Amino acid sequence: MTASLRFLALAALPVALGFAQSPSAPPAAQPIPRTADGKPNLSGVWQGGGVSLYGDAADGTQRKYAAPVNPPPKREPLPYQSWAEAKSKTFTPADDPTLRCLLPGIPRITSMPMPFEIVQTPTEIVIAYESFHAFRIIPINDKLQHPNDLVPTWMGDAVARWDGDTLVVDVTGFNDKTWLSGTGSIHSEDLHVVERFQLNSDDTITYTATVTDPKVLTKPWTTGALLRRPPNTRVEEYECIENNQDVQHIAK
Amino acid sequence: MKIPSRDRLLGACLGLMLSAVPVLAHHSFAAEYDSKTLVTVTGVITKVEWTNPHIYFYVDVKDASGTVVNWAVEGYPPNTLKRTGFTRDDLKIGDMVTVTAYKAKDSSSRLAGREVTFPDGSKKFAGPAGAR
């Protein structure tokens, strides 16, 4: 196939898949914004899901987006060791740490239906999450060197480096009290998460998190999220403990 | 209007349009509410709690025998509601509103609000659709 034919075939693909926004002009790939030091500029407000991002299907406010140029990986079931699988099944939604307004941990917080803001500098990345008032201050450190005085925490200790145009965040130092995703998705203090933030030409971020935990899992597990810029949104206060009636009423 | 004895089911037409997984951000919807049965109540707003992690407003609903029950209606978090165009000022104490909602599984007088019809007839979603 010649180069021009290849281009035409690629250009026609979104139309064939029903994703094109207009019949005449498929959206052109935009160069990604970059900082003065040449890195992809991740700064801004992002969100992984929720009604304030995608609208509500029933009232006509659902927002239509073109198919992402770089979709995140499909989430597979957690590959638990047999004892961990059995233990996982003993939990119910009433045991969810976030029900008590405790921090969701990594990677779970990324898919919460609330926005977060990334502030990027050449030496550190700061992520301020609306959900549960979480924040992470992530030093850029090419050796991914963690401090040697860590004690287990809910959000772990994160350090980052640039792998080409992808921000790689290495997180360790977790406690064993958070869930990875759904009900009973337990882990141990040996949890190690490698997150990747890739800014795409369609102004999305493809987020992937590869989770290893040799005490609990049989192999690494990967999850992901597509992050978009929520319209007219700033990160605001979420004082979760203020009026948490659900904790008294949820089914055991 | 009273709560019908066996919870009037409106899901037949609504259900086709609604998402299958209700999301309330900080807790499991299905573990707290009967997410398959939509009920409708009409009553007067007595109190508004524009709070996290969820808003609540309270509605006095009179049944056929004249007994008034004060129902608590839970909704999305305040920021989520504001971003979808449902503001604190929309809920006025003393206003008569009609609410479609899902009842609590624990038989308390609590509802997960779906849609609110305001005195002028306009409607806004207070929370997610239940499961189909």
Image: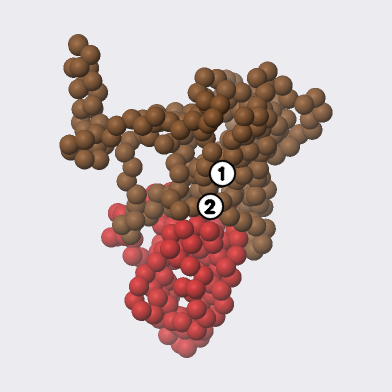
Chain colours: A brown, B red
Q: Nearer the viewer, residue B32 or B118?
A: B118
Question: Looking at the picture, how far across and down is residue A164, in whole percent?
Answer: 52, 19
Q: Amino acid at mark 1?
A: Glu
- Residue A229 is left or right of residue A149, and the answer is left
Question: Looking at the picture, how far across and down is residue B56, in whole percent?
Answer: 55, 68
Q: Secondary structure at mark 1?
A: strand
Q: Nearer the viewer, residue B97 or A156?
A: A156
Q: Chain of mark 2?
A: A
Q: Amino acid at mark 2?
A: Arg
Tell me, yes or no, whether dots 2 and 1 are on the same chain.
yes
| Disc 1 crowd, CA 10 A, few/some/many (<14, 14-19, 20+) | many
Q: What residue sits right under mark 2 in the picture?
A: A234
Q: Quadrant of residue B125?
A: bottom left
Residue at 56% in and 51% down: A235
Q: Quadrant of the N terminus of chain B?
A: bottom left
- Residue A183 is left or right of residue B102, and the answer is right
Q: Residue furthest top?
A: A1
Q: Secondary structure at mark 2?
A: loop
Measured Cα–Cα span from mark 2 to mark 1: 8 Å
Residue at 46% in and 58% down: B83
Q: What residue sits right under mark 1 in the picture?
A: A117
* Circle 2/circle 1 CB separation < 8 Å: yes
| B31, above or below B67, in the image | above
| A194, above or below B20, in the image | above
| A250, above or below B123, in the image | above
